[in-house]
Image: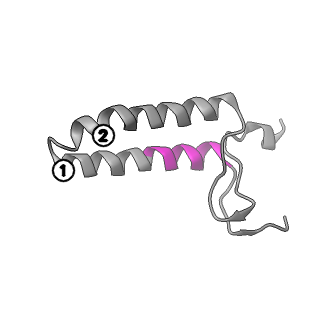
Amino acid sequence: MNDAKSHWFPAKRYGWGWGPPVTWQGWVVLVGWIAILAVVSPWLAPRSMPLFIVFEIVMVAVLLTICFLKGERPRWRWGRD
């Protein structure tokens, strides 16, 4: 199995983290994540700011977890590799 093809999120060329998705699964995750934020955030923010903050933290944690599981190993890159 080609490990590079199994990554949904490639590592960024410069810096630390991931770039845009390279598979349809990655795009579904990213678009779905943004859609959930776009629908829930405007509804939740005026009602309860503490709950809104917890929601945002949980959403970021979910996306980071998916990136760690389905993306390349994150490390600092200088663009040479």
Colouring used for the render: one colour
In this view, the residue in front, 8 or 37, is 37
Q: Secondary structure at mark 2?
A: helix
Circle 1 crowding by C-alpha within 10 Å: few under 14, some 14–19, many from 20: few
Q: Is residue 46 shown above or below 23?
A: below
Query: What residue does disc 1 label?
Result: 49
Label located before the other in sequence (2 or 1):
2
Circle on res. 41: 2
Horizontal side of 33 relative to 15 (left or right) equals left
Tag 1: amino acid:
Met
In this image, 5 relative to 63: left or right? right
Does the magenta run of residues contain 76? no
Q: Are marks 2 and 1 in contact (CB under 8 Å)?
A: no
Seen at 34% across and 48% down, the residue is 56
Name the chief secondary structure element in magenta.
helix
Query: Which residue does the image show at 51% across and 50% down from the upper left?
Result: 64
Q: Please tell me in which quadrant of the rendered image residue 62 appears.
A: top left
Q: Provide residue 40's location: percent of width, then percent of height.
A: 30, 34
The image shows residue 61, relative to residue 37, as above or below, that is below
Give the residue at x 34% y 31%: 39
Tell me the quarter of the image containing the N terminus.
Answer: top right
Around disc 2, counting alpha carbons within 10 Å, would you say few (fewer than 14), some (14 to 19), or many (20 or more)?
A: some
The local secondary structure at tag 1 comes to helix
Residue 38: percent from left, percent from top: 38, 35
Split into 4 quadrants, where in the image is the C terminus? Answer: bottom right
- The correct choice, above or below, for 27 with respect to 59 in the image is above
**Stretch in magenta:** 62-71
- For the point 15% across and 45% down, which residue is it? 48
The amino acid on which the numbered mark 2 sits, given as a three-letter code, is Ser
Q: Is residue 38 left or right of residue 8?
A: left
